[in-house]
Amino acid sequence: MNGLNDFLIALGLNLVTSIIIVRWIYYPKHRSKKYVFTFLAFTLIIFLVVSMMTSVEMSIGVGFGLFAIFSVLRYRTNPIPIREMTYLFIIAALPVMNGSAATADHWAKLLIGNLAVIIILFILENEWGFAFESSKIITYEKINLIRPENHGLLLEDLEERTGLIIKRLEIGKINFLRDTAIIRVYYDNSEQPNRLQIPEEKTKPENKQDFLFTD
């Protein structure tokens, strides 16, 4: 960097961008404080390390080295959800960009780059222009309704009992001994009454064999 002023401006830009992403994009959607500390601590310490380097080449090398260390540490900790991993990568990449290119010749590019990241994340989190389906696996006991001619009754019964507006469904493994069937229902969270946000059910790998189809 070319002095204390560049350092302070870049630090402020990096902190403002990170706080906007964490506080007003990530947190309102997920309401989890588990990763807030990690995100903000990561972006601050990486920025300080990168900003102390004497050249852009060295700063970039340190940045990629930090990514490599982080990827190794990840395999020795509990798995992190893919969305949080993406946020963590962005939060770690921002200080590398802001710290290594914080000069008078690059301020415009940095401002545009930070603003672009904020806008894109905001659009993706609010699903503007996208239609995403969520799904749940249900163990269903009214075995007589899984017949093709009773499809309408099955859909109506599932919507009444779950409260979901179901777009489609798939019938999986059928157990005639217990009179149950495994059914996966698909729905759009944006179409649910009162904008109710329903977390998608996560099926454990060992249970996937329960959802098999036969001709």
Image (cartoon, rainbow, N blue to C red):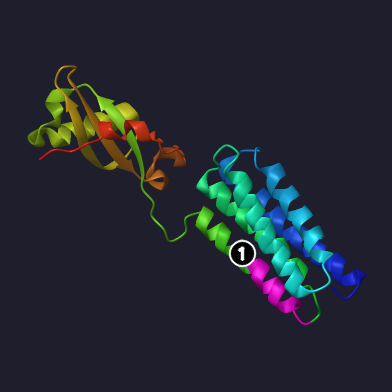
Q: Residue at x 76, y 74 (%)?
A: 56
> Horizontally, is 32 left or right of 12 in the view?
left
Residue that extends furthest to the right in the rendered view of this protein: 4
Q: Main structural element of the magenta stretch: helix, strand or loop?
A: helix
> Horizontally, is 139 left or right of 23 in the view?
left
Quarter of the rendering containing residue 136: top left
Residue 27 vertical position relative to residue 174 in the rendered view, above or below? below
> Horizontally, is 61 left or right of 103 in the view?
left
Tell me the kind of residue under disc 1. Answer: Val
Residue 82 vertical position relative to residue 53 in the rendered view, above or below? above
Q: Is the N terminus in the top left, top right, bottom left or bottom right quadrant?
A: bottom right
Residue that extends furthest to the left in the rendered view of this protein: 149
Label 1 crowd (10 A; few <14 / some 14-19 / many >=20): some
Residue to which mark 1 is pinned: 117
Q: Position of residue 80 (x, y in %)?
A: 56, 42
Q: Which span is picked out in magenta? A: 105-115
Residue that extends furthest to the top in the rendered view of this protein: 178
Q: Position of residue 53 (x, y in %)?
A: 82, 67
SS at mark 1? Answer: helix
